Amino acid sequence: MMVKTYDAIIIGGGVVGSAIARELSRYQLDIAVLEKENDVCCATSGHNSGVLHAGYNNRPGSKMARLCVAGNAGFDQVAAELDIPFRRTGKLVIGFDGDDLRQLKRLKQQGQDNGCRGLCIVGRDRIKELIPDVQGEYALYSPNTGVLDPFQLTIGLAENAHHNGVRYLFGQQVTAIRRQEGLYHIQTTRGWFVSRWVINSAGLYSDRIANMLGVEGYQINPCRGEYFILDQRIGYLLPLPAYPVPNEHSGGLGIHLTPTVDGNIMIGPSADYIDQRDDYAVTRPVMDMLLEEGSRIFPLLRREHFIRNFAGIRPKLTGPGCGGFHDFVIECAPQAPNTVNLIGIESPGLTASTPIAREVVQLIGERERLEEKCDFDPLRRRPPRLRELSVDEQQQMIRENPDYGQVICRCELISKAEVMAAINNPLGVRTMTGIKYRCRSMMGRCQGGYCQTRIAEMLLEKQGGAYDQLLYHHDGSNLFYGRVR
Amino acid sequence: MGGGPAGLAAAVQLKKSGVDNILVIEREKHLGGILRQCIHDGFGLTRFGESLSGPEYAQRFIDEADRYGVESVADSTVIDIAPDKTVIAASRHGLSIYEAQAVILTMGCRERTRGALSIPGSRPAGIYTAGVAQSYINIKNLMIGKRIIILGSGDIGMIMARRLTLEGGQVLGVFEIQPYPSGLPRNIQQCLNDYDIPLYLNRTVSDVHGKSRLEGVTVSQVDEKLQPIPGSEQFYACDTLILSVGLIPENELSRKAGVRLDLRTKGGIVDENFQTSTPGIFAAGNVLHVHDLVDFVSLEAERLAAGVVRYLHQELPACDIEIQPQGLTHTIPQLISGNRDVELFFRVTRPVSQAVVELWQGDKKLTAKRLPKAIPAEMMHITLPASELINKLPVKAVVVNA
């Protein structure tokens, strides 16, 4: 029996793994992505602030700084090619006293050293002009910071990679890797695979995969950050991200405020080292703290504006003892030939994803000749969104496709056409959250109260009515136990 | 806007009053609103003197609407409404733009979510609001769980406790954060007591466990500030958590029409004609304030219809006498003209017995009504006699101990 030998297998289909898949798919290579979950943005890639960072927060000379600045500069093109919702909003880092101002100037200098452009210190009047409802005496204004949809970015990268020939395989948790006669034999929970190259972009589990490859000495320390999401109705309060200067005197974390590209506001994240790498629970003390802080900053806020909370987990290489940041590890270890290990890709991993991927391609290209494809297609399109169209455009869309006239998600104004496109997604993802990430249904203030039953019905129809196979998210997250009659 | 019990009753009453050019816009395939999934009985006790199921009650009005030739479009979702009463609805046939002299808001309400309550813990499958669970079981024929905990003793939660039990589920208990139940006494009897389902007061869910599917919840006792008491935690193994923690009038469209909302009810501020702050836009039913008896919804919608008729004949007086509730959650209406008697509807904020609700204007007591026993779950009413009013100052509606 012939087992296919891949040129490269990428372990981990998050934003980094999928960016790598896309970059590698420009070349004549047989590539597969092994993803342990049922979709591509299930871990860190789908649980973050969705910010395109400018790069002033990173240590000059670090990979983080270099790749973040490159990612920021190149994102207009990525967003255009992959049709990613993105707004270059700018950002304010806000301070109140002389100490803060010194910090802000330091940040500005660091940013300039890293190659960030347009950074400037502004005063109270400009702060008031930009965000009338937020207080501050001084701020660092970063014009190139932006906000994007991290689900759409990860999915867009993956779908384009898939379009260009990359195979995506879900539910494939890697359990062991063996090198034999110059090839890697990769054992997963569902089978085994053979490949010449192994790319480890396993995020929270990248240290474990590295160990399987004989690359030891790295330890991922999961650090959880909790967020609150606020109703779009008050999104107007925050036109651009506003972060406080980390202030040693006040001792607090300082609460970050980030608008989402869809008009919600996110408060958070917190930062707590935890034991389990998949413990996405939200906790009472942190939620109380975020609620209090949010209400202090926006006195207009009411309890009813808080529509949801969630947590993300940072794959940090620094532990609770030292805090701070360890630089990205992107390396070809000599003891594991033909591998690239990406370890500790926390923030700014989202921003840096495509430059990181290009770094990986370069590392591979230094060791073997890569032949470009002549038919690589960089473009990926999402279906038009009813809510973004003018009345005339809506009328036209419905005429062409009546599914556009059937509203499934009332809160976010999402049509059946968009939900059907999400269900018929090219990667074959069939979970309820997979549909949610792709079309935004169930993300509104009623949290699926209206649309969930309809989407479940549509998914069931797609899957031939097998109620026991409909999953919410992970394996084992069945929604139904059977039919009533 | 909305072909549920409120919309249908208003439409029929308008037809009976000689208003002919009416359209009911309904987003579902069928008329009837939320009643369609409420297959339990108890509807229509005061209206018809019978105990009907939700669909049966709705059908009475659907049949009458048919008899009177009420025009309706189904599978149509209103996506925009302007203060000038232009309404845009989307359907598979395209966008329809309607211009109306009057718009009646009867969109009902949505459920409060886990996210809105910020219940801590993981996010596995198996957590449903009661209405969603009801829809899965009653409309989609899908069984959602086996071992069930219900948070909130609202009527829908209790109805679902019984429903799940009847379909073979094991309901471990209903947990209520307040020191008193939030639903009707008859539901406590007929849904919980009759099925030996325990009701625990002063409790809340303080943690959720399970990665893929729910594995259990932690229940804590709460103090008088409704905060969990550390040390009182108890773990319940279960695979399903049903949330029945409040209904919120669905007024996103109302806001687009410039309708001012009452922060207490989350519904529109209306006068005795059920006209909102936007002239020609009226509201009734759950979109105005959450009801416990659909019979009252129908009555309210019929009173609204009378108001619309007066409006169309340009016979609406100014309504600038404000009603100010004290010890009550709210009153509907919030504004009156003082020209005629008005039925004021209200709820008490906590259970009271041997109390009196009084209406005062300045130093004058206008009227009073004995409340031998009043609970927040039951909407009550009192007639405000116009003849007693002395001026245009606000009327205070207060609950006092007898």
Image (tube, rainbow, N blue to C red):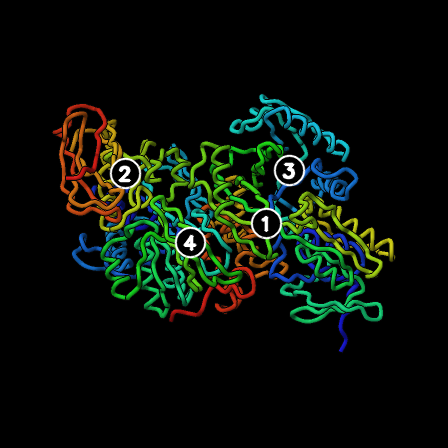
Closer to us: A198 or A273: A273
Q: Residues within 10 Å of mark 1 (few under 14, many from 20)?
A: many
Question: What amino acid is at disc 3?
Answer: Gly
**Are discs 4 and 3 both within one chain?**
no
Is A454 on the left-hand or right-hand side of A109? left
Question: What amino acid is at disc 1?
Answer: Arg
Question: What amino acid is at disc 4?
Answer: Gly
Q: CA distance from mark 2 to mark 1?
A: 42 Å
Q: Residue at x 20, y 46 (%)?
A: B374
Q: Position of residue B236 (x, y in %)?
A: 42, 62
Q: What is the secondary structure assignment of the residue under circle 4?
A: loop
**Are discs 3 and 1 both within one chain?**
yes
Q: What is the secondary structure assignment of the residue under circle 3?
A: strand
Tag 1 residue:
A224
Q: Position of residue B379 (x, y in %)?
A: 23, 46
Q: Quadrant of the C terminus of chain A?
A: bottom left
Is A342 on the left-hand or right-hand side of B99? right
From where the camera sits, is residue A413 visible? no
**Are discs 4 and 2 both within one chain?**
yes
Tag 3 residue:
A146
**Residue A117: which quarter of the image?**
top right
Tag 2 residue:
B330
